[in-house]
C-alpha cells in the first residue's frame, strides 16, 4: 500500500486552514456552547494543543490516504466519498457519543462534527487529486 506523503502534508495543511476559517466564523457560537468568555481567549491555546492539532491532522490525512490506496480508488471523487463515509461512520458517532455522555450542548456537537466533515472531505479530495 503506497501513500503519497506530499498529498498527506498538503491535505493536512489545507484542512487545518479550513478549520481555522470555519471556527473563526463560528467562534461566538462555539464559545457559547463550550461555556467560554472572551477573556478566556487572551492566553490562547497551550502549546500542546498545537502539537495535537498538527499530529492529529497528519495522522487523519495519512490514514485516509492509506484507506483510499488500499481500496484502490485514489481520485477526487473517491476521496470526497471516502472522507464523507469516514466522517459518517467514525467521526460523527464518536463526537456525538462523547458529547452526549459529557452532557455537552447539541450545538457543540454540530459545530465540531461539521468541522470534521469539512476536514475529511477536503483531505480526501486533495489526496485523490494527487492520485497514486
Image (tube, grey):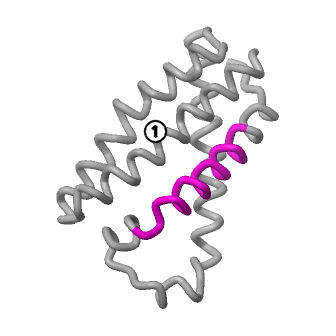
Q: Quadrant where the N terminus lies?
A: top right
Q: Quadrant where the C terminus lies?
A: top right
The quarter holding residue 11 reads top right
For label 1, count other residues whose C-alpha is less than 10 Å away and answer few (under 14), some (14-19) or many (20+): many
Name the residue at 66% across, 56% down: 54
In the rendered view, does 73 fall on the left or right side of 108?
Answer: right
The quarter holding residue 30 reads bottom left
Q: Position of residue 53 (x, y in %)?
A: 60, 59
Indicate whether residue 23 is drawn in magenta. Answer: yes
Indicate whether residue 51 is drawn in magenta. Answer: no
Q: How many numbered markers are drawn?
A: 1
Q: Position of residue 84 (x, y in %)?
A: 45, 27
Question: Which residue is denoted by mark 1 in the rendering?
Answer: 117
In the rendered view, does 114 fall on the left or right side of 110?
Answer: right
- Is residue 65 depicted above or below 115 in this figure? above
In the rendered view, does 29 fall on the left or right side of 50?
Answer: left
- Is residue 106 depicted above or below 126 in this figure? below
Q: Position of residue 38 (x, y in %)?
A: 47, 85
Q: Position of residue 36 (x, y in %)?
A: 38, 80
Name the residue at 34% across, 71% down: 34
In the rendered view, does 120 fall on the left or right side of 87?
Answer: right
Helix, strand or loop at mark 1: helix
Q: Which residues are magenta?
A: 11-28
Q: Please, what is the dominant secondary structure of the magenta stretch?
A: helix
Name the residue at 77% across, 22% down: 130
Name the residue at 64% across, 35% down: 62
- Is residue 10 depicted above or below 34 in this figure? above
Amino acid at each position: 500500500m503506497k501513500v503519497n506523503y506530499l498529498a498527506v502534508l498538503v491535505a493536512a495543511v489545507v484542512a487545518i486552514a479550513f478549520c481555522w476559517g470555519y471556527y473563526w466564523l463560528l467562534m461566538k457560537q462555539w464559545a457559547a456552547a463550550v461555556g467560554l468568555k472572551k477573556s478566556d481567549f487572551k492566553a490562547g491555546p497551550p502549546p500542546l494543543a498545537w502539537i495535537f492539532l498538527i499530529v492529529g491532522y497528519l495522522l487523519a490525512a495519512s490514514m485516509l490516504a492509506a484507506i483510499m490506496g488500499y481500496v484502490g480508488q485514489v481520485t477526487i471523487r473517491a476521496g470526497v466519498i471516502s472522507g464523507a463515509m469516514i466522517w459518517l461512520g467514525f467521526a460523527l458517532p464518536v463526537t456525538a457519543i462523547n458529547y452526549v455522555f459529557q452532557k455537552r450542548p447539541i450545538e457543540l456537537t454540530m459545530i465540531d462534527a461539521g468541522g470534521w466533515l469539512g476536514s475529511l472531505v477536503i483531505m480526501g479530495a486533495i489526496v485523490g487529486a494527487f492520485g497514486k
